[in-house]
Image (cartoon, grey):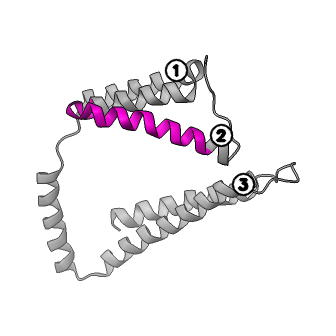
Amino acid sequence: MNKNVTAGGASLLISLIYTVLAFQIPLSSYKSANIQPGTFPIIIGCLWILVSLVLLLQGWLEIRKPKSEREANLIESALSEEEAEPKQDVKKLLVILLMILAYIVLFVYLGYMLSTALFIFGITTYLERKKWVRNLIYAILFPVIVFLVFNNLLDVYLPVGPF
């Protein structure tokens, strides 16, 4: 058995459980609700099942290949991984985790717009210091667009913070 079959099978099992639970979400008590509370979880669950099946199928097709072809692919992928993937930087991972924790804590006090803008600017600047203008544009545009979509189109009100 290869990694794709194992990961695809595990993911399929979890996605099936998730989707069954999503179908059990009660309907909205509002008669005028166009979108029910379970709509998005059901869509996510169905897409997750689909992706899991694709991964499972890829793994199964890989197993069905002749052994010599599989070994050639394995050697080729091992060589390309050594060249392409640098070792994970533990310090960078810890800094990002601390930024996520700070975002979670500040979200309640500063609201969605300000905390998300600070978070996006901080993360993107930490990862790409030289492109701070682009990072600033992303940090401003993304929260504004998401805020407008949620507040105006979906009628889901995000925390506004102290302002």
Helix, strand or loop at label 2? It is helix
**For the residue marked with disc 3, what is the amino acid?**
Gly
The part of the image, by quadrant, that contains residue 72 is bottom left
Q: Nearer the viewer, residue 127 or 22?
A: 127
Callouts 2 and 3 close, C-beta under 8 Å? no
**For the residue marked with disc 1, what is the amino acid?**
Leu
In the rendered view, would you say 17 is above or below 93?
below
Give the Cα separation between the discs numbered 2 and 3.
19 Å
Q: Position of residue 81 (x, y in %)?
A: 17, 55
Q: Position of residue 153 (x, y in %)?
A: 66, 48
Per the image, the residue denoted by label 1 is 106
In the rendered view, would you say 36 is above or below 65?
above
Judged by depth in the image, the label closer to the viewer, 2 or 1, is 2
Q: Nearer the viewer, residue 57 or 39?
A: 39
Which residues, given as a range, are shown in magenta?
126-149
Task: Determine the residue positioned at 49% across, 59% down.
Answer: 10
> For residue 38, which numbered disc appears in the image?
3
Of marks 2 and 3, which one's residue comes earlier in the chain? 3
Please indicate whether residue 46 sits to the left or right of residue 102 in the image: right
Per the image, the residue denoted by label 2 is 151
Give the Cα separation between the discs numbered 1 and 3.
29 Å
Helix, strand or loop at label 3? It is loop
Judged by depth in the image, the label closer to the viewer, 2 or 3, is 2
In the rendered view, would you say 97 is above or below 20?
above
